[in-house]
Amino acid sequence: MEFRGFLYGFYERRLLSELAGGRIPKHIGVMVDGNRRWAKQFNAPTSQGHQAGADKIHEFLGWCQELGVNVVTLYMLSTDNMSRSSEELDLLMGIIANTLDRLDEDANISVHAMGAPELLPDYLAERLNKLTARTPVREKIHVNVAVGYGGRREIVDAVREMLHDAVAKGTDISVLADSLSVDDISRFLYTRGQPDPDLVIRTSGEQRLSGFLMWQSAYSEFYFCEALWPAFRKVDFLRALRDYAGRQRRFGT
């Protein structure tokens, strides 16, 4: 076991040295997938998998701060997940609430909520509002928390808000339709004012977006990892960064 730990540490240091002076993504989106399958592997209750996944989030954010990642978007609960059993959802909501409380304890983290708060229990929506309104002492990393989030819904919400804004300003809708641009819609997304993700990581071996940042990820790089989220190690993260650094990004050319 000690020898295995030694090899793991050696490999981690090697990956870090390969990344030294390299290109680190400024914004990373993460689909934290595989909590339930991880729990099933150990014949553990689903809630234990969700808790292990929540613990991994804090560990992951620490790695990001070490390496200079500025923004992280966490896909924690989709609108599709809302169809799960009420028992599992109640436990998951409680774990998410505790996760938010732990984020609140870090004065160097700023948090932005993404999603439909009306789909969430009042106590969770209130926690999100409180955390979003908090000003960090010294911001080291900005975290977008996607809870009750759906990519299609985000685009619909953005268009709806844009239209309401146009009406409030007395803009003729037909004029807006003729002049509509990509930037017009981007200004009303949940992530308005933020850079689009450079890298999107999905754990658990699944290779699809499942509605995550559909608009913002148009030119993102994608990295799919076989590890289930609670088992996602720092070396897995470093491999993703090494893979990203070795790619030649093309923005529509």
Image (spheres, rainbow, N blue to C red):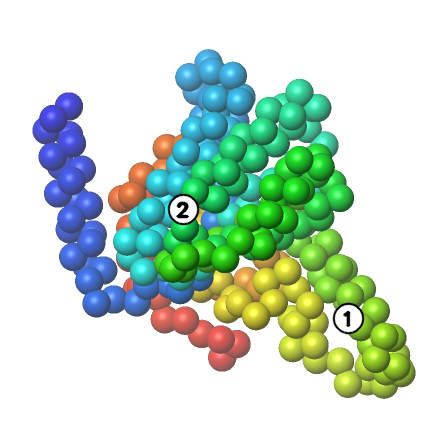
Q: Position of residue 229 (x, y in %)?
A: 43, 36
Identify residue for label 1: 162
User: What label does residue 6 carry, if any?
Assistant: none
Residue that appears at 39% across and 54% down = 108
**Mark in the foreground, 2 or 1:** 2
Q: What is the quadrant of residue 128 in the picture?
A: top right
Residue ID at (71%, 37%)? 122
168 shown above or below 139: below
Q: Give the residue type at disc 1.
A: Met
User: What's the residue at 36%, 71% (across, down)?
Assistant: 248
Q: Quadrant of the N terminus?
A: top left
Residue 236, image x and y in percent?
Answer: 32, 44
Q: Are there few (<14), some (14-19), or many (20+) residues within 10 Å of tag 1? A: some
| 221 with respect to 94 (left or right) | left
Name the residue nearer the viewer: 97 or 198: 97
Secondary structure of residue under mark 1: helix
Which of these two is toward me, 151 or 247?
A: 151
106 versus 184 height, above or below: above
Number of marks drawn = 2
Q: Which residue is mark 2?
A: 106
